[in-house]
Image (cartoon, rainbow, N blue to C red):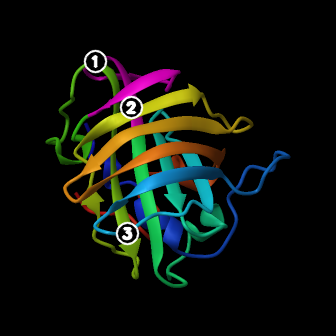
Amino acid sequence: MKRWIALCLLACACGSSSGNSPDAGPTTGSGTLTGTVNGQALTVRDAVFGITPYTDNVNVVVGDRTGLCALLTGSTIPGPTTVFGFGLLNLTTAGNPVAVGLGDYSYADLAHLPPLTSPGSGQWWDGAFAVATTCTPTGTYATAGKVTVTQVGSTTTNLKVTLTNITFPNGSLNGSIEAIYCDALKTQSPPCGAIPP
């Protein structure tokens, strides 16, 4: 698998310009997270997602700033920004991605798989938590947990997920997220914010 989770994680912390879908509805995502990572809590003020063409990966960024989608294409960070970014991958066979569907996604260390390898068939997720002060932040990668998709997202439908025991070397998160569609998250390498594996 491509190192796709180097994701747009902190992309959310950067920029200016809008990429939200023009559909009516809320202009920010929402959610509640409990727990801390490295002693840092995350108060959700926005949540956005995008779908990578041809692979159907879903990239999600949750942050403590509003306007995450508008910040994705920039080159500066307006101040310290706390984010949790994760990717969802649905494989019918080891190398055959299909659209993300309802259900439980198990943790797999997707960010650190060698190129062109796969965790095998199944529904997988991987992610990282960071407090960004630059466009090249250092993240803390998750090590376990479950993401449950309760509503599949599209360009016109919000993505809803429940996070259960998302474990990091120094902490954990639980909660639920409703993310709005963000065209800028169709890529896994936005101008600002990718966390290297």
Looking at the rendered image, the disc whose residue lies closer to the viewer, 3 or 1, is 3
Q: Amino acid at mark 2?
A: Leu
Label 3: state its secondary structure: loop
Figure quadrant of residue 66: bottom right
Quarter of the view holding residue 8: bottom left
Numbered range of the magenta stretch: 88-107
Query: Which disc number belongs to residue 56?
Result: none
**What is the C-alpha distance between the residues marked 1 and 2?**
10 Å
Does the image show residue 120? yes
Specify whether 77 is left or right of 88.
right
| Residue under label 3 | 40
> Which residue in the rendered view is the most extreme toward the right?
24
Label 3 Cα crowd, 10 Å radius (few <14 / some 14-19 / many 20+): some
* SS assignment for the magenta stretch, majority: strand
Is residue 53 positioned above or below 172 on the image?
Answer: above
Choose the circle earlier in sequence order: 3 or 1: 3
Give the number of the mark in front: 2 or 3: 3
Q: Which disc number belongs to residue 89?
A: 2
- Label disc, if present, on residue 121 of the rendered structure: 1
Q: Mark 1: which amino acid?
A: Ser
Is residue 62 part of the magenta span, yes or no?
A: no
Q: Residue at x 21, y 41 (%)?
A: 109
Q: Earlier in the sequence, mark 1 or mark 2?
A: 2
Q: CA distance from mark 3 to mark 1?
A: 34 Å
Q: Residues within 10 Å of mark 1 (few under 14, many from 20)?
A: some
Q: Position of residue 179 (x, y in %)?
A: 62, 46
What x and y, as percent, mark residue 9? 42, 59
Q: CA distance from mark 2 to mark 3?
A: 27 Å
> Which residue appears at 71% of the width and 55% of the height?
20
Q: Could you say where residue 181 lies in the image, as x and y percent from the top left?
A: 65, 46
